[in-house]
Amino acid sequence: MVAGENAGTKLEKAEALGVRVIDEDGFRTLLAEGGVPLDDAEPGEDAPEEGSE
């Protein structure tokens, strides 16, 4: 989840659920580095189904 300055209760709920939270700068860095490799994806994250390419 990307959280802005005033994320409020949505941020609190995401943190309580164990969702990975980054800020805008972290998101830009993630994009610049090419994203998160699928091998590093955490449970519950969307990943392409095999053979869907």
Image (cartoon, rainbow, N blue to C red):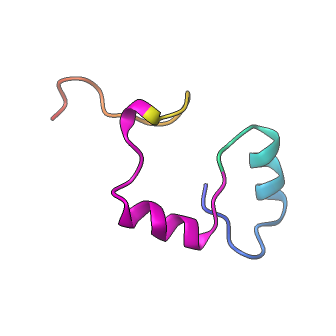
Quadrant location, the C terminus: top left
- Furthest residue in direction top, as rendered: 50
Question: Which residue is rendered at x = 57% and y = 73% of the image?
Answer: 25
Q: Looking at the image, is 44 positioned above or below residue 36?
A: above
On the picture, is 34 further left or further right than 2?
left
Numbered label tally: 0
On the picture, is 36 further left or further right than 52?
right
Q: Looking at the image, is 26 positioned above or below residue 6?
A: above
On the picture, is 12 further left or further right than 25?
right
Which quadrant would residue 11 be assigned to in this image?
Answer: bottom right
Question: Which residue is rendered at x = 66% and y = 54% of the image?
Answer: 21
Residue 42 in magenta stretch: no
Q: Looking at the image, is 21 positioned above or below residue 31?
A: above
Q: Nearer the viewer, residue 33 or 49?
A: 33
Quadrant location, the N terminus: bottom right
Report the magenta residues as a range.
Answer: 21-39
Q: Looking at the image, is 9 positioned above or below residue 52?
A: below
Picture coordinates of residue 52, whole percent (x, y): 19, 30
Picture coordinates of residue 24, whole percent (x, y): 58, 72
Picture coordinates of residue 32, whole percent (x, y): 37, 67
Question: Which residue is rendered at x = 76% and y = 67% of the image?
Answer: 7
